[in-house]
Amino acid sequence: GKSTLLRALAGVLEEIDPGELRGDVLVDGRPVVAGDGRVALAVQDPADARVAGRVGRDVAFGPENLGLPRAEIRDRVEWALAAVGFPYGPQRRTDALSGGEAQRLALAGVLAMRPGALLLDEPTAMLDATAAATVRDAVRRIVREHPCTLVVVEHRLEGWVDVVDRLVVLGDDGRLVADGPIAAVLADRAEDLLARGIWVPGAAGPEPVDVPTELVAPFVEQAPWGWVLRAERVSLERRARQGLSVVRREPRRTLALDGVDLTCHAGAVQALSGPSGAGKSSLLNLVAGLDRPTSGRVVACDGLSRGAGTEPAGWTSPQLAERIGWVPQRAELTVVGASVAASLLATARALGREEAWAQTRGRGLLDLLGLLPAAGRDPHRLSGGELRRLAVASGLAHGPGVAALDEPTVGQDRHTWAAVAGLVAAAARAGTAVAVATHDPSLAALADATTLLRAPAPGGSGRPAPGGGLAR
């Protein structure tokens, strides 16, 4: 109920979540009203907060609605973008941002409003360690320089201990479990918090769950450790979308990847690492056959292509779905059924998998990931963490030969992280070639090899950094 509570504090709960609301939400002793400028909310999915096609216009939206003078709006936009370490200027297209860049943009938008209460829902979940530290520093600075109430929803407390004063813990039933000074709660309730799956600073990380391989084994058996999919010197340029009377202050093309090599082996986990905007998601999309490289090529081995052609970008949708399980950064894009169970098994059924086989795997996956009680629910009503677990399960349930997973552990507590990490490891043990883009060092440590990407400079190289791609 963490995100639900934030929406209530922002005055938007009844607009988003149908249901019966009891009790009162007061700000400065008065009922909260959405849009009055006293409270600003940065939501869990930054794409939900995007309101404009250009970065500057997006950040300016809040201050404009407060009726501020144009000069002050411009100053606030520049200040907010600098505060979160945003790497581009105000004319950058918002549809060209990575997930981590979009998260920083969303935070800049709420910082620019300088509200009396600042509500942040997992504001660093999609960021690398350096960018996350920059964001926390920006939050600390605004609270100090422009005093306001800060409420942060976070699974991982490390990094926030010296930013917040008070720790409030909610239980599985949505009730209050603990509330007090953060140091005191962590000291007095550490064992209880760990048992509840909370990432207590300084505690050893959890071990992945030992998942039976039959839950995720490829439908077509693959020779272990043979190469399955290979990206050879791939580059990717994205074109600016055409619009009406647009004044362009940046190139029409954006270089996302520049001369990158990647090889995915059956039975191995290949991690993609690097800062936000380095091209990890772009590379996964090439591997999944969803984009064609501007130069270079992505080729599949004969055992994976099975007569469909050597390049995945030329396969039909059914051919892609059968061979490659794609889990995008935005988990809601994978929802294709009216219920959790139906969405999970949609691909297996569309491919004609035997119903008993699909049902057995589906039930096992839902049980492993704590989603079995929600099997009949509308997947759009799941929390962000639940939806991501459903997306990972959906990408593996039909038994693809390749799994392309983008940030699969975002938004997970210790228990659900262990289940997701165990699922990734089991898929590899069963013979799947797994490529995973992640900022999570604990997940990356489980990989058999890591490719470290760096963001392409204009006209420069976006190739793997020296030492990237070496097996550990």
Image (cartoon, rainbow, N blue to C red):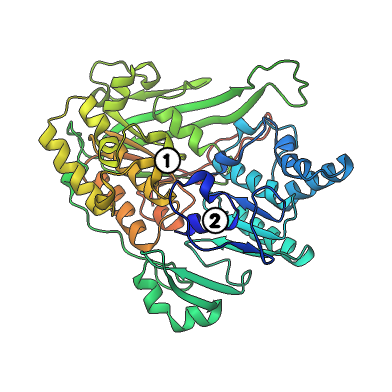
> How far from the left and from the top, in percent, is residue 403?
33, 37
> How far from the left and from the top, in percent, is residue 36?
71, 50
On screen, residue 277 versus residue 373, left or right, reads right
Crowding at label 2, few (<14), some or many (≥20) Cα neighbours within 10 Å?
A: many
Is residue 122 visible to the viewer in this orientation of the structure?
no
Q: Quadrant of the N terminus?
A: bottom left
Camera-nearest residue between 470 and 144: 144
> How far from the left and from the top, in percent, is residue 230?
38, 29
**Which residue corresponds to mark 2?**
8
Give above or below for 348 relative to 41.
Answer: above
Give above or below for 93 relative to 382.
Answer: above
Whole-number angstrom distance, CA of label 1 to CA of label 2 = 23 Å
Task: Tell me the number on the disc at residue 331.
Answer: 1
Q: Residue at x 47, y 56 (%)?
A: 21
Crowding at label 1, few (<14), some or many (≥20) Cα neighbours within 10 Å?
A: many
Q: Nearer the viewer, mark 1 or mark 2?
A: 2
> How far from the left and from the top, in percent, is residue 450?
43, 46
Give above or below for 271 relative to 168.
Answer: above
Camera-nearest residue between 44 and 264: 44
- Numbered disc 2: secondary structure: helix
Q: Amino acid at mark 1?
A: Ala
Q: Amino acid at mark 2?
A: Ala
